[in-house]
């Protein structure tokens, strides 16, 4: 049994700060590839005029999710920019805002009264055309995740409301402010999956969110809100499933094969917006936190440059040591502040030069086994790391490198400061 490591949270101010609507960018930079799966191709050209919510890039491959314009205006450039989803540069579409707020109405919503008579095929098509992906970090296309074999019935839907990342509070604010919308989204997913039991899994320290969730879901059939003392690692879907249902998926297997689907609350919220409002995934709630005076939770348009956000709140860029996007444990450091917000940007965490304290330099492994004892999926990180460093990928695979959940705990506990998690994650891809 792994020793699940406690990681201190820094959420006191952010979790009590209501969601603030961030102004639309003057220029949106929309990455064409933000999901896990096939790469999209632009379906617009430089000089084209686009509307809010208009599809601008897509793929014919099954495992894909289109992207849409978050603003109305003119396409001024198609080129490369840093992609925080993959830590590399990739294709993006620049759109100059015309201020007209022209809406595209291609996506046709349904009413709540129509839900029970709407087929799962229609619902899945709406979700796919809305470009919805897993917003908890993985970025897998939601329509594909919910398109399951007929011989694999789902018994339990776990709504992941744990939000483990130590600085992130975007999901917590959704639970507090958009609770009714989460109920609507869960109803959609239940309709698709054949009405399974629902467990809304959250932490006891989300003191404002828990009673709101309990009240909102109290009238939903076969639904339970469970608040537990969860650690950071238990925010991962596979580890959360074990915490809730007392079993884990065998290596090489998927959760749905055991009758379980896990969906993040932000994804659930996006599903409700798409199905009932006809709104594609063009914005998301993200947390601005770290070494700043006033932590925020922002509803921000996807494609907004990070520099715009920092400028709006007068964050002194000269004092910035680093900006981490997507969570300090599992996210990535930005090499440029011109990188845009993506569908997977759960948070923007700022660290200043003035608060920086030089840490210990990397040294040789001291064979303490901390990384092995703390791995939530019982891998041997140091052995995998050593195999990778020697170029022995065959051995790394025998050590189940692909089962790593990229939680970063091994690097966090390593007294030698070895880049265990980063090295293993790079090898997985």
Image (tube, rainbow, N blue to C red):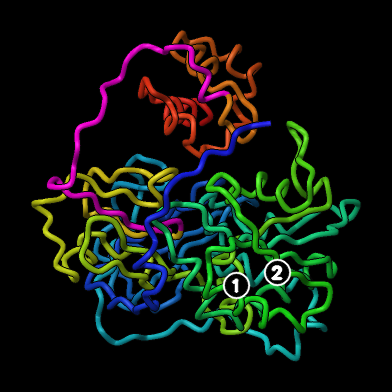
For residue 186, say whether it is visible: yes
What residue did someone put label 2 on?
225
Whole-percent x and y of residue 208? 52, 75
3D distance between C-alphas at marks 2 and 1: 8 Å
Q: Is residue 216 left or right of residue 419?
A: right
Q: Main secondary structure of the magenta part?
A: loop
Q: Is residue 144 left or right of residue 312?
A: right
Closer to us: 255 or 167:
167
Closer to us: 352 or 252:
352
Question: Which corner quadrant holds the N terminus?
Answer: top right
What residue did someone put label 1 on?
210
User: Could you tell me which residue is drawn at 25 percent across and 30 percent down?
Assistant: 359
**Tag 2 near tag 1, CB within 8 Å:** yes
Residue 377 drawn above or below residue 101 = above
Magenta region: 344-372
User: Could you tell me which residue is drawn at 52 percent across and 77 percent down?
Assistant: 176
User: Could you tell me which residue is drawn at 20 percent across and 32 percent down?
Assistant: 358
Whole-percent x and y of residue 188? 72, 74
For residue 80, say whether it is visible: no
């Amino acid at each position: 049994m792994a020793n699940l490591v406690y990681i201190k949270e820094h959420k006191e101010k952010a979790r009590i700060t209501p969601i603030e609507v961030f102004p639309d960018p003057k220029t949106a930079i929309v990455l064409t590839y933000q999901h896990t799966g096939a790469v999209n191709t632009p379906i617009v050209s430089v000089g084209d005029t686009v509307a809010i919510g208009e599809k601008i890039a897509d793929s014919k491959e099954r495992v894909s999710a289109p992207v849409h314009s978050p603003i109305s205006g003119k396409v001024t450039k198609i080129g490369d920019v840093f992609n925080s989803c993959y830590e590399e540069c990739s294709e993006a579409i620049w759109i100059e805002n015309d201020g007209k707020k022209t809406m595209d109405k291609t996506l046709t919503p349904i009413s709540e009264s129509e839900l029970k008579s709407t087929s799962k095929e229609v619902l899945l098509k709406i979700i796919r055309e809305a470009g919805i992906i897993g917003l908890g970090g993985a970025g897998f296309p939601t329509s594909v995740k919910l398109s399951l074999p007929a011989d694999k019935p789902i018994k339990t839907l776990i709504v992941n409301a744990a939000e483990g990342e130590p600085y992130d509070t975007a999901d917590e604010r959704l639970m507090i402010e958009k609770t009714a919308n989460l109920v609507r989204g869960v109803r959609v997913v239940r309709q698709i999956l054949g009405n399974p039991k629902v467990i809304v899994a959250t932490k006891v320290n989300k003191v404002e969110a828990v009673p709101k969730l309990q009240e909102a879901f109290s009238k939903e059939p076969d639904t339970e809100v469970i608040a537990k003392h969860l650690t950071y690692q238990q925010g991962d879907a596979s580890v959360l499933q074990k915490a809730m249902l007392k079993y884990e998926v065998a290596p090489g297997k998927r959760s749905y094969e055991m009758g379980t689907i896990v969906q993040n609350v932000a994804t659930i919220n996006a599903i409700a917006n798409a199905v009932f409002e006809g709104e594609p995934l063009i914005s998301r709630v993200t947390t601005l936190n770290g070494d700043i005076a006033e932590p925020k939770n922002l509803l921000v348009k996807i494609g907004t440059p990070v520099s715009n956000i920092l400028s709006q709140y007068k964050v002194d860029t000269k004092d910035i040591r680093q900006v981490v996007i997507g969570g300090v444990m599992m996210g990535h450091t930005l090499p440029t502040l011109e990188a845009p917000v993506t569908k997977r940007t759960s948070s923007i965490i700022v660290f200043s030069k003035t608060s920086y304290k030089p840490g210990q330099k990397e040294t040789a492994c001291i064979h303490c086994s901390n990384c092995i004892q703390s791995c939530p999926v019982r891998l041997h990180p140091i052995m995998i790391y050593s195999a990778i460093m020697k170029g022995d990928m065959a051995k790394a695979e025998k050590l189940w490198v692909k089962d790593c959940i990229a939680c970063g705990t091994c690097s966090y506990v390593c007294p030698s400061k070895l880049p265990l998690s980063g090295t293993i994650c790079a090898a997985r891809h």
